[in-house]
Structures are given as structure tokens and as C-alpha cells.
Image (cartoon, grey):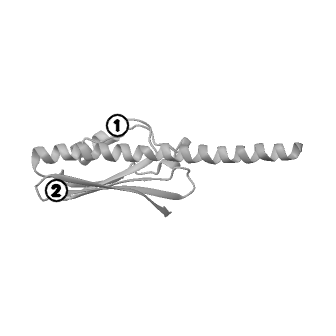
Amino acid sequence: MRSIGLLVILVAACGAKEEAEAYKAKSQAAEAKIYLHRLSNNLKSSFNQNSAFPVGKVGPSPAQPCCKNAGGTCAVSADWGKDPVWVSVDFDPFDPHRFQYTYQSDGKTVVATAIGDLDCDGTTITYKLEMGVGNAGEPTAVFTDAKVSDD
């Protein structure tokens, strides 16, 4: 009877660990969504003022994947403020982060991505923001949740 009780405790502990890992991954992935939504808001404001998105191409930034750093995170860096494209879209992560970001625009459309390997196992996930101009001339945004790819 004692071994059955121990087995129940072990099974429950394993389930709790899996739930904790899933929660951790979900909370880490929230970073990409938050930053891409912030970028979208910045771009909508810019479009409303200039009737175009800032033109340019940059990234991935930072150049080195975050998993190459201690703790699998990229530090806050002043480099974001030195790149004219990132400055033009008013974007820089203000906290340590786990994703690299890209931006590309011809003025009429935008594609921005957040690319990360949250558990540093060589499998990256990519979140995408695509923007354009709607029928009434307003900026539109479409977010695509994580797409998994092996590096």
C-alpha cells in the first residue's frame, strides 16, 4: 500500500513539473507578443503621421542569438539606439530578452519577426507581425503565433 501512495505522489509531481515547464515557456514567449504589439502601435502612429511606414531593413538584432549568452538572455543594449532603422520605428527592448528581432518595410508593408530558442535546444520559434494599408487607408496589423523550426 505504501508503494502505491509513493507512486501517486511521483506521478503528481511529474505532472506538476510538466505544468510548470509549460507555464514557464508560455510566460517567456509572451515577451515576443508584447514587443511586437508595441512595435505595431509605434508603426500605426508613424503611419498616421507620415502616410507611410518607416522604410528600411534591419536584423536580426542582436546579431548573436540570446542562447549564446549566460542564462539564454540578451542584455539590454544601447546598440538599438544607434541603428537608424530601429530608431525610426522607436523600438528597443528595455529589459533583458530571449528573442532576436527583425524589421523590413518598403513604406507600404511591414514584416517584423521575433525569433527565439527559449530552452536553448537548437529549436527556434518565430512570431511574425505583418502590416499593410486597409481599404480606407488605415494601417492594418496581422500577428502570427509561433512557428517552430529546427536550426
Find numbered disc 1 in the image and state the secondary structure of the residue it sits on: helix
Residue occupying image coordinates x 77% and y 46%: 8
Nearer to me, 25 or 110: 25
Q: What element carries label 2?
A: loop
Mark 2 = which residue?
107
**Is there any visible trace of residue 89 in the rendered image?**
no
Q: In this view, does 36 lie above or below 150?
A: above
* Residue sitting at the far right: 1
Residue beneath disc 1 = 78
For the point 46% across and 45% down, the residue is 98
In percent of width and height, residue 137 lies at: 11, 55
Q: Name the kind of residue labelled 1 in the image.
A: Ala
Q: Which of 14 and 146 is in front in this view?
A: 14
Instruction: Tell me if 119 is positioned left or right of 46 in this view.
Output: right
Dots 2 and 1: beta carbons under 8 Å? no
Which amino acid does the dot numbered 2 rest on?
A: Gly
**What is the C-alpha distance between the residues marked 2 and 1?**
26 Å
